[in-house]
Image (cartoon, rainbow, N blue to C red):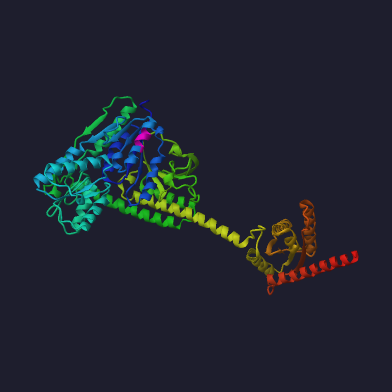
Amino acid sequence: MDKHKTKKIVVVVSGLDEEYQHNVFKGINTYAYANNLNISYVAGFGGMVGSATFDIGESSIYNLIDYTKFDGAILMTNTFGDTNMRNSIFRKVVAANIPAVVFENHENSDFYDISIDNFGVMKKLVNHIIRDHGAKVINYVSGPLGNPDGKSRYDAFVSAMEENGLTVDPKRVFYGDFKSYDGKMAVDAFVESGLSLPDAFICANDSMALTVASSLEKLGHKVPDDIMVTGFDNTFSARNSSPAITSVKCPLYEVGRTAAEIISNVIDGIPQPKSTILDAEPVLTESCGCKSSSTDELVEYKKLTYRKTEDTNNNIHMINRLTAGLAEAMTSDEYFNVIASLIGELDCEKFTLCLSEDWQDDYASVSAPEDPDYYSEYMIAPLIWDKGERRKIGYFQSDEMFPEGFEERGCVNYFLPLHYSDRCLGYYIFTNSEFPTYSLLCHTLTMILSNSLENIRKLFHLNKANDELNRLYVIDPLCNIYNRNGFYNLADDVFRECAAEGRQIMISFIDMDGLKFINDNYGHNEGDFAIQRLANTISSCCDPNCICARFGGDEFVYFNPNASRGDAVAFTKRITKSLESLNKLVQKPYVISASIGSVITVAKKDDTIFSIIKMADDKMYEIKKEKKAARKSEKLSEK
């Protein structure tokens, strides 16, 4: 590959906002910007809200990836607890025939591996707690055993316990997902168990250890005086907490930088070792009763804490305003406008919103778990915010991932899913922004965008349903013209205007002739046919500014708000002539005809439209009587 060409690397990871991921990302990103790599992180937040259905929606983002579009992959599959998900990712990468670096994966010879000796270093830490501090009763907070890191660290704990003649009590093992909230859940589960206080809580990572320590102290237990707590990763927060957490020092920044360097060299054809093992060692400090190793970072910690607090407050303020704005959005365009007005406050260079082309469709199709593709074939990008400028893309193929294609430059992108429960709505992309990794609010932002998008979708369908109900309320379903409700709703206002202006109006009452005869002799379907054709005839003879309606049964009404004296005769002639043509065309064994009574008068404020309709109805009956009398006279003369 041309060394000057931008290399496209996909990084697959679960979660963004834990310090483990953040430190690895820093190593990857530093190398990427310096060496012209286009990095695309694809991440979901599985296991965050305790809902399997929600997690299906989060994991949809991994089905977006077309690995053939990339030159290489960095697979942080050690952050996944789901073995099936990890194996699915591996199969797709192998099928795409691109090189990949995998963290903590020793089974697959297709990939380059970066790892630390999880088993050996965790066993050293557990032995220290047992042998140097005399712990005999130990609670263990595990990562998922389907995760290679979680399994190695758990196995090391069990091995150390057995080697020291101690029994692992299954009731004292809590299986978490490496998330900080799991530490609180582990302590809650311990309290509910009713077991005696252990000598130590050994945790599979620092995120869980920190919340274990704080939860225990909230219960009145002092760390380490009453109980020891240990973690793993030696994160900045763990080093600078009070007490500082005894942990394992992992070179996370170096792991990320090395992974990026290896994949870049492999793409360039430079041979690399298949397996790279980086050093890790226990850091014995305050939470197990050993002295703090250093206070050199205290000033930096204070600065970082202040900066993080300030950033978090600013982000909360922005997200609150975003939430309020999205709550008021009634249409998709208003939704996009709210995002565009605020997203720049998150210090991103570019924000791209991508939605499935059918995102607003009603959910009547197969549910997402049974759909292997998740994303529709085509997507739309209704909002691309780029350095303050705004544009959109109508349609693009979902396997392109970027609506405008990959950028030929060193940059960093974060792909995050938009979904409602297990229903995939789309995704969004942050480009060259630290917000997804430094802020604890990125997942909150994702959920707000997703839920608001779903509200817009539901509102769209609710408005459609209301429109249809309103249409059914005012439209006659058989004749597809106004019914009595529709006529009064529209004609009342027009009539009041006519009365206020003293305009001359015409109202005609139309009654079909012989409907009972047609129903009795040819059936109600033929009766409906005749009514429909009469309605069509009246509608076709209705001038643009006039109103016609089915008043009920075989009765119709016509309202002309600007009538002249000859309009009544002209209207009757148009109807009669049209019906004559119709009867010749349809060749039915019966004749479709109607009696029409019309009233032309100047509308007055004391009048009502109903009173004039009654006058027209009376006229119509007079005409109908005359017709009957004429037919009777004809029959008598024939005899």
Residue 556 makes an appearance in the image: no
Q: Closer to the camera, 260 or 115?
A: 115
Decide which of 382, 200 is in the foreground and name it. 200
Please check the rendered image and state whether residue 90 is part of the magenta-colored stretch, yes or no.
Answer: yes
Q: Quadrant of residue 559?
A: bottom right
Q: Return the x and y of residue 544 as percentages of the image width and height.
A: 70, 57
Q: Which residues are magenta?
A: 88-93
Looking at the rendered structure, the number of numbered marks drawn on it comes to 0
Is residue 474 among what the camera can see? yes
Indicate left or right for 172 with 462 as reference. left
Spot occupied by residue 401 in the image (x, y as percentages of width and height): 43, 39
Residue at horizontal 24 percent and vertical 35 percent from the top: 115
How far across and how far down the image is residue 117, in percent? 20, 36
Residue plotted at (17% across, 56% down) = 195
Q: Is residue 128 shown left or right of residue 497? A: left
Q: Residue furthest front?
A: 521
Q: Position of residue 111 (x, y in %)?
A: 31, 31
Which image quarter holds the N terminus?
top left
| Residue at the farthest bottom position | 606
Q: Is residue 636 magenta?
A: no
Where residue 600 sits, quadrant-wise, is bottom right
Q: Is residue 70 above or below residue 547?
A: above
Task: Locate the C terminus and report the quarter of the image it occupies.
Answer: bottom right
- 148 in relation to 242, above or below: above
Dividing the picture into quadrants, the one containing residue 248 is top left
